[in-house]
Image (cartoon, helix red, strand yellow):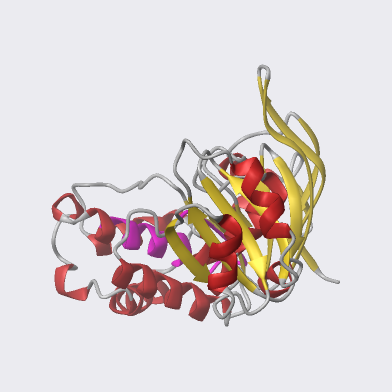
Amino acid sequence: MDLAIETNNLKRYFGDIHAVDGIDLAVPKGSLFGFLGPNGAGKTTTISMLSTVLPPTSGKANILGYDLKKESNKIKECIGVCPQDIVLYERLTARENIHLIAQMHGLKKADYKERTDDLLGRMNLLDRVNSLVKTYSGGMKRRVNVLMAVIHEPELIFFDEPTAGLDPQSRRVVWDFIKDFQKKKSTIILTTHNMEEADDLSDELIIIDNGKIITQGTPSNLKGRLGEGDIVEFKVDEAINREKIIPRIKDLNFVKWVKPIGKRRILLNGLDALRHISKIMDAVKVKMLDISIRENTLEDVFIDLTGRRLRD
């Protein structure tokens, strides 16, 4: 397998804080590889190391055939980075911001001028192309940041939470753009805590928590590990002892597993759960609040592995 990224026991410590605690990665070239995890899981720190911004405390990494420690300048020439925090020159227009990055990468004007307007059009920004970006909304600025990461058509692109703060329509525009860009055979690393984003975009992904990879696979395979059936989630009054309820639910022959979540919630997996909801209510014997029934999601995988939600 031809790899874009390969790491061995990669670590980054900040004093006693183990932000990244021994990560092993093998990312195939041309793939869209997701990093899914809650805030503070170590996603951005990992990206910062792989993109040469932050030196590892220990471990090894090979990026596009170059050693991370010894050949960082070579790596910088081949990658694009869209950071989590918006980085723009506010007194320049969107076009000028993108042109500046193109010039920094040594592109000729003939190569980047037409490409810039094409990219701006795909992000629905041409109508404001001559306005200073300080007049843009937060969502517009984030879309410009995405374009600045790809103007030089890098082999490897890091998108760190690229849709944070975007409205649903703008988020979909960015998703479609990332998908289209991958078709050019670029390798894309996407960090997110949005399970729908990870599920919709990733060919393969890792779920990361507390600086460690806790599982890896395709979205469908990861969700499939929870088995067939529906997820039922509900809340009980805080005076209710859940430990008395859970065994009664487990005794139902169509229920595969039951888990307490947070302080008041219960999560269960049951075959054809919608049809059996009255039986679940009979077993619970107390008022069920905020009931929802859904298919398995990547967040359910995270709950299964950690006992808490991605957003907790």
Residue 79 can be seen in this image: no
Within the magenta stretch, is there residue 310?
no
38 with respect to 87 (left or right): right
Which quadrant holds residue 69? top right
Q: Which quadrant does the N terminus fall into?
A: bottom right
Q: Look at 67% across and 33% down and name the residue there.
A: 55
Which quadrant holds residue 96? bottom left
- In front here: 280 or 18? 280
Residue 259 can be seen in this image: yes
Q: How many marks?
A: 0
Relative vertical location of residue 163 with respect to residue 124 in this rendering, above or below:
above
* Residue 141, percent from left and from top: 28, 56
- In front here: 64 or 213? 213
* Residue 140, percent from left and from top: 25, 61
- In front here: 137 or 212? 212
* Residue 152, percent from left and from top: 49, 66
Which region of the structure is painted magenta? Answer: 141-161
301 with respect to 293 (left or right): right
Q: Look at 54% across and 72% down and name the residue there.
A: 277
Within the magenta stretch, is there residue 153?
yes
